[in-house]
């Protein structure tokens, strides 16, 4: 035996270790469920599978090889069999806990894949440490289904850190809110009233649509969706649709949008199109006791006064007209400055009683039924051939 080996033996026998001490060793043997290390002590160190990983199915021979060096922590100096019980996973967990504590204190942004979608949120794991992200902190908007996050790598910060109670809470919403505020500020810096910009329809309500402008949402009010009348925004726009709008107004962080571009204003050249004496066709849009408003072009309504409906006395428009009914009338007055146009059916005798309109509609429907019942030309030809 060499002097060196003898000195090593003396060191090993004289060396003392304590429970909880961190030691480094060299792997001298590996079994599927156990790792043996030379830790420079009179007894070898043993790491069982359960003290190496939380995965009970792992074959340790596939993750560790003889000659590998491992830093471990002493559980028991004597495990009862004259060997030193070591742990690898607990040391890693402590290091991870320390790292997460620093991340919590510094507000560091962490990144990890979602390992599990739970009823109340998401679970991610960093260095075998489980972090829970409540559903309310996953996004800056309400999300009914979180399954889309499964296996997706996400960023978050820690807003609560209490490893003793096994309560480590992540927050993804905070980052989204901060990013949204940053993008909003950048957008507001570069846009001005009158700018034309493209956006994507994000949400549709009864009173308008919210358009994502790439940093902030703008409101396209129902009154700004068309020069004509819009009854239901959902009949015009769909979520995800790209639209071209212009900035109508900016107040603080609120952005008002419009698609009523000035060059498309139906009152442009109106004096020529709607000159007095012109015979037009329009549809009844709405009625009052004193008259009916007729849409003669998208965004242009003209007044048909009750006295101008028929040569016969009419008490109120709803007695003789219907919403949506198409009429023919003569323009008798045009006020471009006030955007007012007056019509007259009486002037051209175009009023037709409702009873007559119904009779004509029935005749047209009957004619269509007869036409549909008639044999097709190729059927008649085939019959003649027979």
Image (cartoon, rainbow, N blue to C red):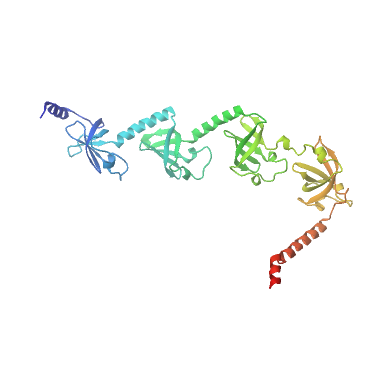
Instruction: Give x and y (percent) for residue 192.
Output: 64, 28
* 377 left or right of 19 in image: right
Q: Which residue is rendered at x = 32% and y = 43% of the image? A: 55
Instruction: Give x and y (percent) for residue 188.
Output: 60, 29
Place residue 181 in its image quadrant: top right
Place residue 372 in its image quadrant: bottom right
In the image, 186 versus 98, the foreground residue is 186
**From the viewer's perspective, is residue 41 above or below residue 357?**
above
* 226 left or right of 327 in image: left
Instruction: Give x and y (percent) for residue 78.
Output: 19, 36
In the image, 354 versus 171, the foreground residue is 354
In the image, 59 versus 120, the foreground residue is 59
In the rendered image, the quadrant that contains the N terminus is: top left
Q: Residue furthest left?
A: 1
* 380 left or right of 336 in image: left
In the rendered image, the quadrant that contains the C terminus is: bottom right
Q: Which residue is rendered at x = 26% and y = 42% of the image? A: 61
Q: Which residue is rendered at x = 27% and y = 36% of the image? A: 87
* 227 left or right of 179 in image: right
């Amino acid at each position: 035996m060499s002097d060196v080996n003898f000195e090593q033996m003396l060191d090993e026998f004289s060396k003392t270790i304590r429970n909880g001490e961190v030691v480094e060793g060299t792997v001298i043997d590996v079994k599927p469920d156990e790792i043996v290390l030379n830790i420079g002590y009179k007894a070898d160190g043993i790491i069982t599978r359960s003290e190496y990983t939380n995965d009970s199915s792992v074959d340790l021979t596939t993750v560790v090889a003889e000659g590998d060096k491992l830093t471990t922590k002493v559980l028991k100096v004597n495990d009862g069999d004259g060997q030193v019980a070591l742990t690898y996973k607990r040391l890693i967990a402590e290091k991870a806990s320390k790292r997460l504590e620093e991340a919590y204190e510094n507000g560091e942004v962490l990144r990890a894949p979602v390992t599990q979608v739970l009823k109340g949120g998401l679970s991610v794991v960093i260095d075998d440490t489980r972090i829970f992200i409540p559903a309310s902190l996953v996004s800056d908007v309400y999300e009914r289904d979180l399954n889309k996050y499964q296996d997706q790598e996400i960023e978050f910060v820690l807003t609560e850190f209490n490893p003793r109670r096994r309560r480590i809470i992540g927050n993804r919403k905070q980052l989204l809110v901060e990013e949204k505020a940053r993008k909003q500020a950048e957008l507001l810096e570069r846009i001005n009233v009158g700018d034309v910009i493209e956006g994507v329809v994000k949400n549709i309500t009864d009173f308008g649509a919210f358009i994502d402008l790439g940093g902030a949402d703008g409101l396209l009010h129902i009154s700004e969706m068309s020069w004509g009348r819009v009854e239901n925004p959902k009949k015009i726009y769909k979520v995800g649709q790209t639209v071209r709008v212009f900035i109508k107004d900016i107040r603080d962080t609120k952005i008002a949008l419009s698609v009523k571009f000035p060059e498309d204003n139906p009152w442009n050249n109106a004096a020529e199109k709607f000159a007095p004496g012109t015979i037009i066709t329009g549809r009844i849009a709405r009625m009052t006791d004193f008259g009916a408003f007729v849409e003669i072009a998208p965004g242009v309504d003209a007044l048909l006064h009750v006295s101008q409906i028929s040569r016969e006395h009419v008490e109120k428009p709803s007695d003789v007209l219907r919403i949506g009914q198409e009429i023919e009338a003569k323009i008798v007055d045009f006020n471009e400055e006030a955007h007012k146009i007056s019509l007259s059916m009486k002037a051209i005798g175009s009023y037709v009683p409702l009873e007559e309109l119904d009779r004509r509609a029935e005749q047209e429907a009957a004619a269509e039924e007869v036409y549909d019942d008639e044999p097709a030309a190729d059927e008649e030809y085939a019959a003649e051939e027979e």
